[in-house]
Amino acid sequence: MTTPRVVVIGGGITGLSLAFTLQESARRLGAPLALTVVDAAPRVGGHAWTTRANGFLIEAGPNGFLNREPHTLALVEALELGARLVEARPEAKRRFIVRDGRLCQVPDGPATLLTTPALSWRGKLRLMGEPFAAGPPAGVEETIHAFATRRIGAEAAEMLVDAAVSGISAGDSRRLSVGAQFPLMTDMERDHGSLVRAMFARRRQGTGPSKLLSFDQGMGTLVGALADRLGNAVQPDSPVLAIERTGDTWRVTMSGSRTLEADHVVVAASARAAAPMVGVLDGRLAAALDRFEYAGLTVVALGYRATDLPRALDGYGYLVTRPEGLASLGVVWESSLFPGRAPEGAALLRVMMGGSRRPEVVKASDEQKVTLAQAELARVMGIEAMPRHVSVFTWPGAIAQYTVGHFQRRADVMDRLGRHPGLWMCGTSYDGVSFNHAVKSGRLTAHRLADRLWGDRRPVDGATEVESASDRWEVETSGPNGAPGRPARSDPPSPRAAAGA
């Protein structure tokens, strides 16, 4: 039996999930597989990176994931990490926004809607009139802001939805496509005529609030387990310069004139990173990849003595509304979410800065970022003390932006990709921007590639068995190289969404 050669480019969570899932399929079949994962960075994991310093456990990127995605849970089970999962404390359900310079609790039900200062009485009345809002305009790809304004009013769209979108994607709700970024929103409106009626229907069906999960030693736990299981197949410090085709063989050229030959190449890096790799192979594909937009993000983690904080960290944290004019998109009160994030008597906060609102912040020096973060914490929370610990993480192209026209940009890439059998692309540039989306994109691509390699012999895992109807629809209508027909469904940004969720 010929041994298939597969090269995965990108050692973030998408690429690692893909490689492990494919490796497990081969193992269960007893089939040979020559698998290599290359990444330009000196370590794998991408944004999912946990550090430890001065007794603090600090996330450089995502701090958890929601328990609604079977692919992520199946991956955790396959890695035997279930016992290491931790659930966010109940206080995490309490979330805030900054309005008029003060923290206002976000409404999470009818009672708090009546009392919250996050909205004026006019704004509350307009929000409660959502079931009677006008339907969608014909033939228009609405932005999230336009959709929210139409459904719940201009004030709630600005104070709740725009702030939540900045926290989730570091993006601008006035430019992001609601159908691409949050297709569940448009599905709810289409199926029920109202978001409120749709939420009641989901409750009757037993679809309750999701739970925020992490690991006892942070999100790096998952990355470390994946890297350990993949072993020598993972090659960090291996930036890819070019992907070319020679007869029936793919050739991947890396720095130092190193090359790998493969039957299949999967690019699990961002579209922006992929564009120069395929420039010689297909200039039109490279141009299509170059059209994707990204928002940069800086994370400033600050550790304090608990007694230096003027108020209790009694919630998830807060989001900053656009009219405040701050560089901070939101602040996560990390030590209030999960145990073990700060030493006894200390507290850990993570300040998310930059995004599409303030892109210049990402280019500032670390010292400038720390000074700005401290100044804005003093303004909002009254924290004047110097921190015990400071860490700064900067991600220049952190999050893909599904601006209006995303569907066409994605279709253009998949159309060109169909001309190159054996070349695959997946990840958050195309299939949803959350951690769950990244895992799902990798695993679904692994299943499709396994189908190509081994056909009906491919074993089916638990997550595949419980795929939703929309997942099956994506598989059945996949493109020539297995690319799904549209981005995965995503929950809308509820008023309870917070930075980094």
Image (tube, grey):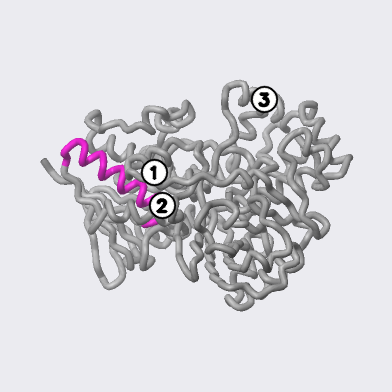
Where is residue 113? Give x, y as percent: 79, 38
Crowdedness near tag 3: few (<14), some (14–19) or many (≥20) residues, C-alpha within 10 Å: few
| Residue type highlighted by circle 2 | Ile
Crowdedness near tag 1: few (<14), some (14–19) or many (≥20) residues, C-alpha within 10 Å: few
Start-end of magenta stretch: 11-31
Q: Earlier in the sequence, mark 1 or mark 3?
A: 1
Where is residue 35? Give x, y as percent: 24, 51
Q: Quadrant of residue 186?
A: top right
Where is residue 41? Give x, y as percent: 38, 66
- In the image, residue 362 sits, relative to residue 106, either above or below, namely below
Q: Quadrant of residue 108?
A: top right
* In front of the other: 223 or 187: 223
- In the image, residue 81 sits, relative to residue 459, either above or below, namely below
Q: Which residue carries the number 3 mark?
A: 200
Crowdedness near tag 2: few (<14), some (14–19) or many (≥20) residues, C-alpha within 10 Å: many
Q: Secondary structure at mark 3?
A: helix
Instruction: Specify whether residue 23 is painted magenta.
Output: yes
Residue 115 visible, this angle: yes
Q: CA distance from mark 1 to mark 3?
A: 33 Å
State which mark lies toward you, 1 or 3. Answer: 1
Q: Earlier in the sequence, mark 3 or mark 2?
A: 2
Q: CA distance from mark 3 to mark 2?
A: 34 Å
- Taking the spot 45% from the left edge, 57% from the top edge, the residue there is 48
Q: Secondary structure at mark 2?
A: helix
Q: Main secondary structure of the magenta part?
A: helix
| Residue type highlighted by circle 3 | Phe
Query: Which numbered tag is attached to residue 83?
Result: 1
Q: Residue furthest left?
A: 1
Where is residue 106? Give x, y as percent: 74, 45
Q: Which residue carries the number 2 mark?
A: 13
Q: CA distance from mark 2 to mark 1?
A: 20 Å
State which mark lies toward you, 3 or 2. Answer: 3
